[in-house]
Image (cartoon, coloured by chain):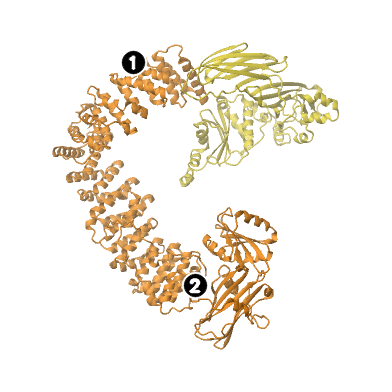
Amino acid sequence: MPAVSKGDGMRGLAVFISDIRNCKSKEAEIKRINKELANIRSKFKGDKALDGYSKKKYVCKLLFIFLLGHDIDFGHMEAVNLLSSNKYTEKQIGYLFISVLVNSNSELIRLINNAIKNDLASRNPTFMCLALHCIANVGSREMGEAFAADIPRILVAGDSMDSVKQSAALCLLRLYKASPDLVPMGEWTARVVHLLNDQHMGVVTAAVSLITCLCKKNPDDFKTCISLAVSRLSRIVSSASTDLQDYTYYFVPAPWLSVKLLRLLQCYPPPEDAAVKGRLVECLETVLNKAQEPPKSKKVQHSNAKNAILFETISLIIHYDSEPNLLVRACNQLGQFLQHRETNLRYLALESMCTLASSEFSHEAVKTHIDTVINALKTERDVSVRQRAADLLYAMCDRSNAKQIVSEMLRYLETADYAIREEIVLKVAILAEKYAVDYSWYVDTILNLIRIAGDYVSEEVWYRVLQIVTNRDDVQGYAAKTVFEALQAPACHENMVKVGGYILGEFGNLIAGDPRSSPPVQFSLLHSKFHLCSVATRALLLSTYIKFINLFPETKATIQGVLRAGSQLRNADVELQQRAVEYLTLSSVASTDVLATVLEEMPPFPERESSILAKLKRKKGPGAASALDDGRRDASSNDINGGVEPTPSTVSTPSPSADLLGLRAAPPPAAAPAPAGAGNLLVDVSSEGPAAQPGLGPTPEEAFLSELEPPAPESPMALLADPAPAADPGSEDIGSPIPEADELMNKFVCKNNGVLFENQLLQIGVKSEFRQNLGRMYLFYGNKTSVQFQSFTPTVVHPGDLQTQLAVQTKRVAAQVDGGAQVQQVLNIECLRDFLTPPLLSVRFRYGGAPQSLTLKLPVTINKFFQPTEMAAQDFFQRWKQLSLPQQEAQKIFKATHPMDAEVTKAKLLGFGSALLDNVDPNPENFVGAGIIQTKALQVGCLLRLEPNAQAQMYRLTLRTSKEPVSRHLCELLAQQF
Amino acid sequence: MIGGLFIYNHKGEVLISRVYRDDIGKRQAADLAVFSSSWPFLEERVNRRNAVDAFRVNVIHARQQVRSPVTNIARTSFFHVKRSNIWLAAVTKQNVNAAMVFEFLYKMCDVMAAYFGKISEENIKNNFVLIYELLDEILDFGYPQNSETGALKTFITQQGIKSQHQTKEEQSQITSQVTGQIGWRREGIKYRRNELFLDVLESVNLLMSPQGQVLSAHVSGRVVMKSYLSGMPECKFGMNDKIVIEKQGKGTADETSKSGKQSIAIDDCTFHQCVRLSKFDSERSISFIPPDGEFELMRYRTTKDIILPFRVIPLVREVGRTKLEVKVVIKSNFKPSLLAQKIEVRIPTPLNTSGVQVICMKGKAKYKASENAIVWKIKRMAGMKESQISAEIELLPTNDKKKWARPPISMNFEVPFAPSGLKVRYLKVFEPKLNYSDHDVIKWVRYIGRSGIYETRC
């Protein structure tokens, strides 16, 4: 482009710019600009015609002001006028203004398009170029629509100048990238391909860019370009550095064009025509040869240009993947770069080698550089290069060098950057598994991995170890021994404890012969880590313990002690608590045979795709893709490494703890502290086991009650007619209730059935139902001994003035209870008015001659006569307000003694007897209930509100009833339940 | 507690830097190396390149003009005022009373102006020793001290301490005076002529609708006194404060009716520290021992019964898309015997103005393109007169659809009366020890009303 000649220099513009630069403050600058804008406005007013020079000058000033960050809202018209000027400089400024400041103003766009059209048709190459540049710079859709058809015509027209062709090709490329649908494909495409033969290198370069972009969408249309590109490439490659004059860059002939041609060729498979292919191979060889030549210049530009061609050549060779000779040569060439001074070169070499390693032809060649790569991993300063080195190690690994590579990677792991540790852990795990010759090495490697980078060992990795150890008999003993030794380290990672716990639980017996790892030692070693671990690990360890009971009966007592400890049995975590309770019961109830069946060694896992590989795939590490290709290549040689066979199953490995007993699926609906909430497993055990006795041990509630299910045949009427004579407190000497009576009774505040009392002699079960102010209670007295109870007399006593509040009729029971048998007593209860203290049950009998006496509180509380009432929020609040006297309200704030579970709380409140009202309280966390206490004399309305605070582990309970003592009593009763 | 004080020129170069406390910009680089990775980015920036640079980068060179006078950068507060091209910034890390800091900065400006006139880059560079000396005196460990120019001038002199030939006695007097009860006046001042000047300076602010309706108006005024009085005179200042007049009026009912019209309601006022506030609270009388020389006795604000010296009547007519006709009439609204001065009416023009023709009957009018306004200047104008300007503005059609926002017409002037209606009723001087009486003192009173933001919408 001709430079602006001296005489054409715009003095006014220069003065203005220097004024602006000399401004001392922002305000001064704005003032100067305002002044200039006013001047330009007055000049553009239109009453006198401006010459082209002034127009250009003012448009230039406007452009400068715009670039300083001020809005320009006029002058567009003048700029468009400049377009029609015949002077190059004026036209150029006009196009510049429009490229920078154009907005989709419809009328102006039409004018601009018109001017561009004129220029395109002008046959003046400079004007055509300016117009094409403007189209490309604006690149808007409107412009695309207007000119998409014209530009290909200019591009392929025989009489177009080279520079115009060049601009047209690039302009078309821009439009195509902006809106591909606008560029019509047609017969011109074939002629575009022939531009590759053009004499002018610039045209060829521009055309290659265009073709590369176009052929991605419709490769078939441009297939003919292959041979043309190859011949063009061979001409460049074989030319001497002086042949191409303008296009030689630091002694490298047309480097950009070469790179672009090589890229274009990568869009297609290897040429089928033997001659073309031969020529291409020759080219590629020449490039490789040239890389060996001494550099013609020491300048960095020279080597950069040369290497750019070389790397693009290598990617083409890798893309073709069919010329073993070339692949090996490329590999050797890259090998030289591995130790190059330039960090960028080393990076690129490693990256290319990664792809080379996946080719079967060059894999061996890549392997020869292993030492260099390992060295790079150790000594490289740049982290991204180290990452590439790790990728390459992973890619080049096979059976022959696996041990070396894995050990190097493990060593590197200790100092690796945190960002890539997890990836390296996964890679090590996969390599160790895939190329494991013997499994003791595999186990060693993984345990090392956990030791070095435990935090980065994901679940998948250690699940996989367990799967493999479980499936391989030969390695189990070794694994147990190694794990045992690893656990002896004073500080070991939690993942190690998990693996150790599982393996010792399964195969601890294999090393138990050694006195150094005798069962008690194993147990105490594991248990010493127990308290430092998270809940999940503890749960796993509990399962290990129960397995120990099976494996080593001599540890039974110790382990039962551990399970029985309050910290397990009353653990805040439901999972741990349940496991402790169940395992304890299992160990005490089940016989050795049962234990051995239940706690049998785990069966081998079904073969699956390695979950680690799946994880690495998810991570999509740059090296992962090639690694997966490896899997395909090595599939045939995987005789002993069954684990890596890529089966389509995507099932993730279930947690081993879940596999052990399958308990996780059924958490108990209510975490009642009583041992009555056991799952199905225990029921099965006790029903099948020969030693299982009904009534012995903490039999599950359901089983207990089902045996007692058919209620007493007597009709209630008969009972009512026969009041119990024993219900006279005066005649009998009643002892005070046993100390735990209150606690026992509290269990029944929210439920009606269950075991009321139990000692080594006697078990008392309760089953009751209440309707309105009447209730019926069945008491079951079970003799747990084998000796008959003599003169067995249960009586119900009403302390204080309870007599007037509650009527209880009992039926006399048989005086003798045989050993192992049980008797049933029916109580009919009628609530006369509200009461606070429960009636007492006094049981007297003679056991082996000795008189026994026992006094309990009958689980009859005022809330049993609760009638749930449903009401709307409005009603509730109305009633709530009605009961606003201070004595009608009872409130209690207390700490939660049980885990705060909304479902459990709900169940308890329902059991308490009130209706639960949803959508009353604005806070969904809170519970609101309502009900009426039915007595014969009166009815007491009752409203309650429970506000849990999960953070503080506190509850606030508010009760409002129409009777003061009832509020307080209910509040106290309910408060004890949470 | 001001941590430091910096003075910058318009380029952001530091002219004066005085650090009073270690907490600003003194953090060691070693500390930073440990914490920098976890600290917020700005915090790091403030400490590494210290507070001086932080202000320059974030306020003076900010891409968008910083409007707030208080800027918080990484838990450091910068309070700045700008005088012409000079920035004064007080820096602190503590939670200070912002009003105190600004009061101090303004006082600092006053003191510097009293010492070397206009605050400009050149003056500051020429007087930098003096400024450091002043800073040492008026700010101790970040706590403002006596900043009374009169008192300062006794011991910080521009000619150097020797030229004054101060005796030991005088030096000891300085100590007792500065630490004494009346820190603003030294003893033993003697004048042959006891003279005092009282200036009532007011600025009137107005926003008026095109129809002539007052949207908001208030007057903020100052009473500035220049006293050349001997000894320790006790002065009493009286003005037509409504409360005082009414209180007196209780005794003599006829006086109330006479002076009731002239009394003014003062919304709020502040006094120089020499005024006895307790006496003002109880009796609402203003009595004080004045400092020697010039000082601002009080500041006040009124919003009721303001005399608006000028009325602006705009008339704007749009003739097609390319022409605008503007006619503005101004009417003076005060006694015909008084003369207003320095009248300037500023009529904003649209941003696409391409040419302006102005015709005015009085004064000179000119279109100033750099300010996008027509500026009409009249040197003098008597009360109850009227003057008119008409202008034809040519517009350039633009493709911008935004309508012209029509900024208000603003006005500047100076009138020789107080627009609030404030009158000085008396200023009595009592000096019991020396033998001159109130009658011997020559008193001068002057009223100047200036325009503040005096705008009329068009």
Mark 1 burial class by Cα count in 10 Å: few <14, some 14-19, many 20+: few
Q: Nearer the viewer, residue A304 or B128?
A: A304
Mark 2 burial class by Cα count in 10 Å: few <14, some 14-19, many 20+: some
Q: Which mark is residue A701?
A: 2
What amino acid is at disc 2?
A: Glu
Instruction: Tell me, yes or no, if residue A195 can be seen here.
Output: yes
What amino acid is at disc 1?
A: Asn
Q: Earlier in the sequence, mark 2 or mark 1?
A: 1
User: Which chain identifier belongs to the yellow chain?
Assistant: B
- Residue found at x 51% / y 28%: B11
Image-based side of A623 in relation to B283, left or right: left
User: Which chain identifier belongs to the orange chain?
Assistant: A
> Residue A439, position in %: x, y?
28, 63
Which residue carries the number 1 mark?
A86
- Residue found at x 44% / y 73%: A683
Circles 2, 1 touching at the beta carbon (< 8 Å): no
Foreground label between 2 and 1: 2
